[in-house]
Amino acid sequence: MSAGKFGLTVGASLIALSSIGFPGDAQACACCSEIGQRLEQNGAMDAYERGELGNVRFAAVARLFSDPGFPDSVEGVASPSDQDYRLVVRRQGNGMVFELADVQGRAGRISFPLPKKLTRFEVDPRDAAAEPGGNGPVLYKEWRLDGVA
């Protein structure tokens, strides 16, 4: 091997390594958001969203949240309780059934067929003037499902 070929190989390797970079501050973005970005979008629920909803696991205990008019402002519950409710959620066909029971053993059921559309709400609440910190952006993502229960 001549010196000329060796020099070319070493030079090409250095260029390749410089374009790859070396360890340092990692700049990764899993969701590509910008400071203050906000998105609200309505659209059809596709197989991905249905699959993700199928992966949601619910807590075994639920609590009724209401306004200051409680219990008079609660409709559809004969004797609303401010205590915890036992919760079991089952998938049924193209929907979900929420079974609730209070501490006295009174039970009820809410059937919710999954709608064909959903609203996606996402916001990156970081403040450009605030000190950077943590492990990246603090994101808030929400899927809103509207339908008749």
Image: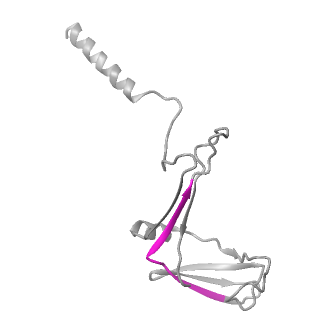
Q: Nearer the viewer, residue 135 or 140?
A: 140
Place residue 61 in its image quadrant.
bottom right
The spot of residue 60 in percent (x, y) is 65, 74
The residue that appears at 69% across and 87% down in the rendered structure is 75
The residue that appears at 27% across and 12% down in the rendered structure is 7
Q: Tell me the magenta residue range.
A: 108-123
Q: Is residue 148 magenta?
A: no
128 w.r.t. 12: above or below: below
The residue that appears at 71% across and 80% down in the rendered structure is 85
Q: Is residue 8 left or right of residue 124?
A: left
Place residue 134 in its image quadrant.
top right
Place residue 1 in its image quadrant.
top left
Q: Is residue 122 magenta?
A: yes
Image quadrant holding the C terminus, namely bottom right
Dominant secondary-structure state across the stretch colored magenta: strand
135 w.r.t. 146: above or below: above
